[in-house]
Amino acid sequence: MTKIKLCGLSRIEDIEAANQLKPDFIGFVFAQKSKRRVSHLKAAELKSKLNPGTKAVGVFLDDDLDTVGALMNLGIVDMVQLHGSEDEEYITKLRAITDKPIIKAFIINSADDLRRAGESTADYVLLDGGKGEGRAFNWELLERIKRPFFLAGGLNPGNAEAAVADLHPYAVDVSTGIETDGVKDKNKMTAFVEAVRKGEEK
């Protein structure tokens, strides 16, 4: 069964919607320049309201190792997603700080990008078309990936069903595609989850 990650949640209303929809993961963005960024205190507040069955993923962009490790070890996030230029050395050092699972994001423009994703020592890889812009990449390249992956970039309620049915990703990750005017939209969140479930039936 394809898992679902609803990313970039920043309001109590977003958490309440997620608690009804029961995705496998939600994402808190800590990247400094992101319009979806939440403070550590806000993330802690939101996490306290989150259904215990849903894992909170912290999204970081070239952040200080100690900061990332502290958030994980304080229980504010259950998993870490590295969305910058973090290399294998960074991942090794992070593992020395925390035993929580690590997702490494890769922007896919070529077969070589997929090769690097396949070789990553992260627990999971996330394949994206950009850094949160909601841009899709050429899904035909995915024939080259030999490990489970999170599919991100350009997903929305209109294409999620086909993406799941055709590509069988380990998980799908959406943010822009469930927003209206830059704010999470409960109706779109619901439609996205329903589309993913329909795709699994095919």
Image (spheres, rainbow, N blue to C red):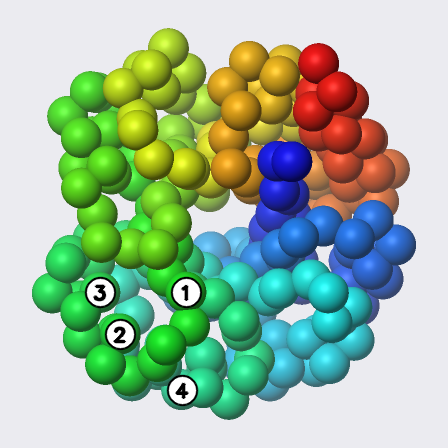
Which residue type carries mark 1?
Pro
Percent x, y for residue 138?
A: 37, 15
Amino acid, disc 3: Ile
The residue located at (55%, 13%) in the rendering is 166
The answer to the question of whether label 4 and label 1 lie on touching residues, with beta carbons closer than 8 A, is no
Q: Which residue is identified by label 1?
A: 101
Report the residue at 18% width, 30% height from top. 115
Mark 3, residues whose alpha carbon is within 10 Å: few (<14), some, or many (≥20)? Answer: some
| Residue matched to label 3 | 91
Q: Position of residue 182 (x, y in %)?
A: 66, 44
Q: Looking at the image, is mark 4 or mark 3 earlier in the sequence? A: 4
Q: Residues within 10 Å of mark 1 (few under 14, many from 20)?
A: some
Q: Is residue 199 above or below residue 189?
A: above
Residue 76 drawn at (x, y percent):
56, 80
**How far from the left and from the top, in percent, is residue 70?**
40, 86
Can I make out residue 83 in this image?
Answer: no
Q: CA distance from mark 2 to mark 1?
A: 9 Å
Structural distance between the alpha carbons of marks 4 and 3: 15 Å
Quadrant of the image for the C terminus?
Answer: top right
Residue contact at pointers 2 and 1, CB within 8 angstroms: no
Distance from disc 3 to disc 2, alpha carbons, whole Å, reads 6 Å
Type of amino acid under label 2: Arg
Name the quadrant containing residue 95.
bottom left
How many tags in the picture? Answer: 4
Residue bearing mark 2: 95
Q: Tag 1, which secondary structure?
A: loop
| Residue under pointer 4 | 70
- Please state which amino acid type lies under the numbered disc 4: Ala
Q: Disc 3 or 1, which lies upstream in sequence?
A: 3
Tags 3 and 2 in contact by the CB under 8 Å rule?
A: yes
